[in-house]
Amino acid sequence: MQILIKNALIADGSRAPLYKGHIIVEDDRIKEISTEALLTEDGFEEIIEGEGLVAAPGFIDTHSHSDLKVLTEPLVLPKVMQGITTEVLGQDGISMAPLPKEYIDSWRKNIAGLDGESDTINWGYETTENYLKQIEEARPGINESYLVPHGNVRMEAMGLADREPSDEEIKKMCEITRREMEAGCLGLSSGLIYTPCAYSETSEIIELCKVVAEYDGVFVVHQRSEADTILSSMEEIIEVGRKSGVKIHYSHFKVCGKDNWDKLEDMLRLLDKAREEGIRVSLDQYPYVAGSTMLGIILPPWAHDGGTNELIRRLKEEGQREKMKQDIKAGIPGWDNFIQFAGVEGIFITSTASLKNRELVGKSLKEIGEQKGIDPLEAAFDLLAEENNAVGMVDFYGTEEAVIKILKREEMNACTDGLLSGKPHPRVYGSFPRILGKYVREEKALSLEEAVYKLTYKAAQAMNLKDRGLLKAGYYADITIFHPDTIIDKGTYTDPIQYPEGISHVLVNGQIAVKNGKHTGKQAGRVLRRLF
């Protein structure tokens, strides 16, 4: 099959200046890009008129939480409708695979706040290889790749307890990591605020990353702190890179809480120092001043010891609740206390597993406490217990000035980090168009060429994705075509489920997934396994 995209302004992903030309797609690859006059339009099954439009490589989302949704809703519409053609799953050290059968019940509850819940899929896949096969069988609408999650590896090797591993358990974790890298993972992820990852010492992470480095993989990390102790947290990750040789990638890079905003310049100096030392560092960012994760993260780490079933038991004991409240109010050294930097008035519920509490979606913890006539923390504890920890949230923490400073960094590429359930953060539907509309066209923080690079080839380089991220003959035909004068995100925190404006066409592996702003129903995505 041949497709012609004619007369488009081409932003090829390399940061080269825009130029006008024609793109010829044959089957799943770009056959030719030409600036010469067309001699004929015969022989093409589809002709896309690109006059006034920008043709760019398909956008790459390096931090996604579609891990479960891709099996139940494989078109992944919130992503493809904003021009994303590839996403990276397995984030934050807690995801779908590997998953030993004896931990299925507890683990489903542990990840439900991030990835959602479903009784319709087969949870008995056990390994990453089998999980990836399930994605292939679901026929995804976009390309899917995977990071082996540290927490899953730890769970398989030593369970969910809060303790240090033995030498034998470290060896077992390394073996599991190697097995999953051989299954095609791009690298290792960890979420050092999420259990059981939070129970690990730096030495454990270094040993696993030594295995990942053998495959030239990447260590993608939600670091231990994005608030009070962010500088020492960054230094820990740099030390992992230094001692293991692994390439490090900071997830959703930011600084949280007004008391910490002045730390940003020191954070950027640490990035400069690491690069000067020869440590490979990259990072991703979503272009908003609020974040999103699971509500259970407001609880001190010890409350999660032993898994979600143990957490629920503790939430039902008055003495344990009091201890949780004391730790939240007083803080724990080295722990990111979301209540402290966002406040009960700045944390909003985005999803619940059951219908019972669905009317609380969109309300802050302060509003829920007032509605129920109880302390907001007690209201949060009740909600987590009733929903078996399957509650999502949005938290407000940052500034526009910080967003722009990070956006301009050479290490930065874009991501969504969006939870797809309930009433999500607007980044799920609009991160990439927001950069092109708000930060390129309106605020002129970046040139169009630089922004496209950060949405495409920079991301491909960070994740070692081959033959994607550029408009170049021989590369896969993942192509996003947009209106530079109208592209913008539309979702808000109160009404987030809105597709953006300005996305005209999206091609995935040479097939038209979006045509004139409408999805065609094509499911042309593939599982992208490590090829290095």
Image: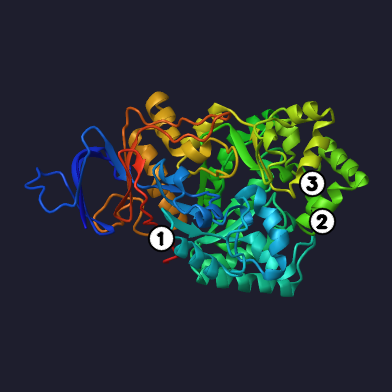
Mark 3–mark 1 distance (CA, rounded to whole Å): 38 Å
Q: Nearer the viewer, mark 2 or mark 3?
A: 3
Q: Residue furthest left?
A: 39
- State which quadrant residue 270 falls in: top right
* Other-residue count near label 3 (Cα within 10 Å), few / some / many at <14 / 14–19 / ≥20: many
Q: Quadrant of the C terminus?
A: bottom left
In the image, residue 202 above or below residue 6: below
Residue 217 appears in view: yes
Amino acid type at circle 2 is Glu
Kindly report the distance in space between the C-alpha atoms of the residues bearing marks 2 and 1.
38 Å
Is the residue under label 3 in contact with that under label 2 (CB below 8 Å)? no
Q: Amino acid at mark 3?
A: Ala
Q: Secondary structure at mark 3?
A: helix
Residue at mark 3: 385
Nearest the viewer among 353 and 208 is 353
Q: Label 2: which residue?
A: 310
Q: Residue furthest top?
A: 442
Asked whether 353 or 445 is in front, the reply is: 353
